[in-house]
Image (cartoon, grey):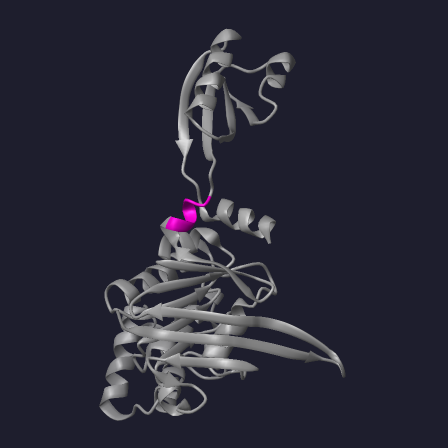
Amino acid sequence: MAIAIELKKLSKIFEQGSKEQFQAVDSIDLSINAGEVFGFLGPNGAGKTTILKLICGLITQTQGTIKLNGFDIMTDRHNAMRQIGVVLEGGRNIYWQLSTLENLLYYGRLKGFSGPELHNRATMLLHDLELWDCRYELVGDFSRGTQQKVAIACALVANPPIVLFDEPTLGLDVQAARTVKKWIAKLAREEGKTIILTTHQLDIAEQLCDFVGIMNKGKLIALKPVNELLNLCSHTSYQIKLQGPLNEAQTDLFSGFTINQHDDETILSGTLLNSHELYGLIEKIKANGLALLSASKVNNNLEEVFVLLMNQN
């Protein structure tokens, strides 16, 4: 497959005072194929947003190279920047004192579009993102969710092959977040665009991403397809339902489990290494005269993998 984004030995060091330095990005090597959805995960200060700012040219790397569809952002910046659209967290890539339509026309002209081609593209996006009725209204008067939709429209108005999203659903209500997730999926699956997103919301990465890179202290500590990352957890989580409440002595039998009691059920949640441990638990339940209602396996998720890798690093 064609490589859409290529990072080689990418580093960024920020000066802090006269002598102190902070390495936000530490020698990252990464290739992202065209049409993939790639997610950067990591704690605050891991370097995720810094990488996005480097890719879109807002800051300059200390070392290394960045190529977008083969164009080096340092030696061929004009062509490189035409490859990308950017949706920054907090609507920072839109002008609040301009109307929705004025924002789209402004960003389209920045990327070299004009005339009927630009107006037709803007009209399509305004309809598709349900912004047509507010096209003449000032963006600063909109809700957070509507501003995010305007930011997406501005990022797409020049029809770039690569789109960068920084925390795309942060602070949005359920309906607005659902709309943004639907559009990210549409851009990748239907239009073949390459997507990079940063997020703290691991369920979003799990739903949308093909590949995930987990960062910590400026380094890339894991780089795998989502399904392979989910297999990093050697344990399996289970949920065991018992009939009726447990007394104090019975509760002590399951000290390694989280115990929740409500209505006429007790739910045990915990991890087991293999099927033998599960059979042993069921025998313990039977030997103590407890009624087993169900035993179900809970699939691993990215949150468990994330915690595991953070503890290892």
To which quarter of the image does residue 116 belong? bottom left
Question: Taking the image as drawn, is residue 91 in sight?
Answer: no
Q: Residue at x 56, y 68 (%)?
A: 47
- Quadrant in which the N terminus appears: bottom left
Image x and y of residue 166, in percent:
48, 68
Q: Residue at x 38, y 70 (%)?
A: 31
Span shown in magenta:
228-232
Image x and y of residue 30, in percent:
43, 69
Image x and y of residue 251, in percent:
61, 18
To which quarter of the image does residue 134 belong? bottom left
- Quadrant in which the C terminus appears: bottom right
Question: Taking the image as drawn, is residue 44 in sight?
Answer: yes
Q: Residue at x 37, y 74 (%)?
A: 5
Say whether residue 118 is left or right of residue 78. Answer: left
Q: Residue at x 40, y 86 (%)?
A: 72
Query: Is 296 drawn above or below residue 74 in the view shown?
Result: above
